[in-house]
Image (cartoon, helix red, strand yellow):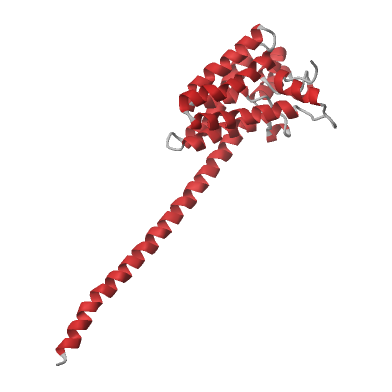
Amino acid sequence: MSAGPIRRVQRHAPASRSATTRSATTRSATTRSATTRSATTRSAATTLALAYLAGSLPFSNLAALSLAGVDLRRVGTGTVSGSGLYQVSGLGPLVLAGSLDLAKGAIGAKLAGTARPGLRAMAGGMAVAGHNWSPWLRGAGGRGLAPALGASLTFAPEAVAVLGLGLSGGRLLRQTGAGCFWAMLALFPVLAVTKGRTGLSDAAVLVAPMLVKRLLGNYLPGHPSLAVCLNRLVMDRDGP
């Protein structure tokens, strides 16, 4: 008579162990998933921070200081750019500093890798932001075109062609600011055609810091008029 209960206990024991095993497996999988998400978040934050720091390196100003003893923030418009460097140091330093500015724009995008296209584009935008508002220059900087070109090389080569055409066409017409502005706007339809909705977001993260820098300039008047704001956006200067 005692064999019956014993057999029932033997039948239920494996089920109990199986439920316990499934519960432990679920908890382990949940823990691993949370750990993976946390590591991914930290990795993305690190990539964006490194992209910003790389973009913030002021190669043009360093070259101007070392070769001509000139702080580009103190001459002309106060913009730390290749154009300012060319005026004080010539073509050779411009080519070197310009190449470094292109390279620094690509660093963050390369670190993000091809598996994370959204992060890759955001890293490009952070490089542009670092160039425009460099902590090493107390928030001063350039206009962001060179690092934007460097970042675009890694994920949207067609953007390089559009921005390059705007830059070269603007120089030919002696309206570089306007040429670059229209090229920035042209990025949206061009990348939308070649990359769809992803292309629109790519264009947005690259163009936004460049347009904001134009609007704010190197200083913001106390009460800027609409005309001043439009001139800054389109022509990249205060006057008509």
| Residue 116 location (% of width, % of height) | 46, 38
Q: Quadrant of residue 201?
A: top right
Is residue 101 depicted above or below 15 in this figure?
above
Identity of the residue furthest to the right in this view:
222
135 or 129: nearer the eye? 129
| Residue 62 location (% of width, % of height) | 67, 24
Is residue 41 depicted above or below 142 in this figure?
below
| Residue 166 location (% of width, % of height) | 60, 15
Query: From where the camera sits, is residue 72 visible?
Result: no
69 or 185: nearer the eye? 185
Image quarter (top left, top right, bottom left or bottom right) of the N terminus: bottom left
Is residue 205 depicted above or below 18 in this figure?
above
Residue at x 65% of width, y 11% of height: 170
Residue at x 42% of width, y 37% of height: 115
Image quarter (top left, top right, bottom left or bottom right) of the C terminus: top right
Is 30 left or right of 230, judged from the image as shown?
left
| Residue 211 location (% of width, % of height) | 67, 27
Is 20 left or right of 113, judged from the image as shown?
left
173 or 190: nearer the eye? 190
Is 220 left or right of 136, judged from the image as shown?
right
Query: From where the camera sits, is residue 66 visible?
Result: yes
Residue at x 54% of width, y 43% of height: 46
Is 162 left or right of 21, judged from the image as shown?
right
Q: Quadrant of residue 8?
A: bottom left
Residue at x 65% of width, y 15% of height: 179
